[in-house]
Amino acid sequence: MGEIQLVQDKAIYCYEHPRPAVTVDIILFVFQEEQLRVLLIRRANEPFKGKWALPGGFIGENEDLYDAALRELKEETNVSNVYLEQLYTVGKPDRDPRTRVITVAYFALLSAEEVAQQEVHGASDAGETRWWDIYDLPELAFDHQQILDYALQRLRWKLEWTALGFLLLPSEFTLSELQRVYETILNEPLDKRNFRRKILAAGVIEPTGNMRAGDHRPARLYRFTATAIELEQARRRFP
Amino acid sequence: MGEIQLVQDKAIYCYEHPRPAVTVDIILFVFQEEQLRVLLIRRANEPFKGKWALPGGFIGENEDLYDAALRELKEETNVSNVYLEQLYTVGKPDRDPRTRVITVAYFALLSAEEVAQQEVHGASDAGETRWWDIYDLPELAFDHQQILDYALQRLRWKLEWTALGFLLLPSEFTLSELQRVYETILNEPLDKRNFRRKILAAGVIEPTGNMRAGDHRPARLYRFTATAIELEQARRRFP
DNA sequence: AGCAAAAAGTGTCATACTGACAACATGTTT
DNA sequence: AAACATGTTGTCAGTATGACACTTTTTGCT
C-alpha cells in the first residue's frame, strides 16, 4: 500500500489515495500564581508566523496517538509526567492553508510542583514558549482558539463532576488553595462553607496532619485519597 | 506539499513524510423490537473477511470529518437524517494490518420512524448489512468491539444526563415506551413512578393529547418539547 | 503588650431531590 | 362477568442543596 520512492535523493511516501497529515496538539493547563494558564508556542514560520499556537506535531509512523502526544509534549516543552486525555479531533479541509491536516487534540494537566521542577522551555524547532493566562490570551494560529475553548469547557465539566482538581495542585494543599483553583477555572466565586462541605463529603481528600504556616492563621494541609484521582462521580440519573 | 504522480497509468499521491490513512466509522444505534441495535456490515474482503464491522470509510480529500461520516452513512446504509456526534479517535499503529489507519469514530442515533421509512440496506462495496442486538453481537473486525463498548458507555451517559432518548423513538410515544428505551439502554429495570416523575419534571416532553389504543388501557401519547433535544442538563456542582 | 488586619475555620435552616414502595383504573380477552 | 394486561397515580423518610455570618488563630504594626 504505502510505497517509498526516492526523488532527487529525498525519500517520499506515495499512496494510491490522497492522505491527510495527522497531528497531535496538546492543551497543557497549569495553575500558577492564582491563574489558570496554558502553554503556547510562538510560530517561527508561515503560516501564522508570529502568532501563538498549541504545542503539537506530526504523529510518528508507528506511534500511538497518546504516545505521540506525550512525545510532542516532551520534545517541545520538556514536560513529562502529565495527565493526558483525548479531547477532540478537528479536520476542516482548509484549517491549515498548506495541506490537509487532521488534528487530534489532547488535554493535559500538570501539577504546580512539576512545573517548578521540570523547567519548561521551548525546544529546538519550536520558537518562544510561554504560559498564558486563559482569560488573557493572544491571537491564536489556525483554529486553536476553538480547540482551547472546548478544552476549557471540558476542564470545567471534569472539575465539577470528577475529582480532577488535584492534578493542578501540589501534593499537599490547603482547602483555600483548592477553592481558588475551582474558582479560577469555573470563573466565579464559590461559598467557602458549601465548598468545604462538598469536597470533604466527596471523600476524595484527607488531612495530612501537617499545617501550612506563614501567612496568618495556619491552614490544615490535605492530600488526595489514593485512588480518587479519576473517580468518575458515578451518579446515576435513574435509580 | 502533496504531489500527484502517474505510475503505470495510475495516479498516486506522494508526500515528504509518511501519512496515515484516515477513516470515519459510525456506530449507528436504533431501538427496534424492544432491542437496542447497531448496524454492522459483514466484511467481503481481507482482512477480517467474513467478520462484522462498523460502517465507515476514507475521508474525502476536501471533506470535513462530520460530512464524511454523513456521507459514509448514506452510501453504505442509505440512512440520512440522523443525529451524529464525534465519539473518539483511535490510532494504534497495528490496528489495521494493511497500513496505518487512524479512525475517527462517530456515534449516531436514528429514530424508529426513520428506520422504517429509509429502507436501510447494504450498498455496493459493502457486503451484507444487518442490525444487531447490542447485547448479542457477533465477533467484530479490527478494534471495533472496543469502539462499540465506548459508544454504549457514551450513549448511557447521554441518556442519563441529557434529553437524548427521543432520537430513538417515533415522534409520538407513550411513557412506557420511553421507559423501555431507557431500561434497554441502561440494561436494568427502572421504577415506573420515579421514572415518570423525573421525566415529567425535566420538562422535556409534553402530552400530545392523543392516545395509543389497541393493547389494553389506552396510553397517553407524548412528544418532545421543541428545543429540548440536546438540552445539556446544566446541573452545577458548585452553586 | 496591645490592637488591627488577614486568613482559617465552623453550623443552621428551609427547600428540593431521591429512592423505596402498592393500589386503583381502564381497556382487552376468554 | 371474570381474569388479564397495561396505564396511571402519591406518600414518606432520608439526603443533598443553597443561602447565610461569626469566631479563631496567627501576623504585623505601633
Image (cartoon, coloured by chain):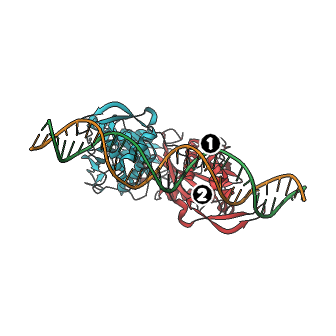
Chain colours: A cyan, B red, C green, D orange
Upstream in sequence: badge 2 or badge 1: 1
Tell me where residue A73 appears, x and y as whole percent: 34, 41
Horizontal arrangement in the rendering, residue A28 relative to residue B12 (left or right): left
Q: Amino acid at mark 1?
A: Leu
Tell me where residue A18 appears, x and y as whole percent: 46, 52
Quarter where residue B50 is shown: top right
Nearest to the observer: residue A2 or residue B178: B178
Horizontal arrangement in the rendering, residue B237 relative to residue A141 (left or right): right
Q: CA distance from mark 2 to mark 1?
A: 36 Å
Tell me where residue A87 appears, x and y as whole percent: 43, 48
Tell me if residue B13 can be seen. no
Look at the picture and state if C25 lies above or below B141.
below
Q: Residue at x 57, y 59 (%)?
A: B201
Q: How many marks?
A: 2
Q: Which mark is residue B140?
A: 1
Quarter where residue A99 is shown: bottom left
Q: Which residue is mark 2?
A: B199
Nearest to the observer: residue A102 or residue B13: A102
Tell me the element at label 1.
loop
Q: Amino acid at mark 2?
A: Ile
Considering every residue shown, the one lying at the far bottom of the view is B209
Tell me where residue C21 appears, x and y as whole percent: 68, 46
> Residue under mark 2: which chain is it in?
B
Look at the picture and state if A174 lies above or below A160.
above
Q: Residue at x 57, y 61 (%)?
A: B204
Tell me the element at label 2.
helix
> Residue under mark 1: which chain is it in?
B
Could you confirm whether marks 2 and 1 are on the same chain? yes
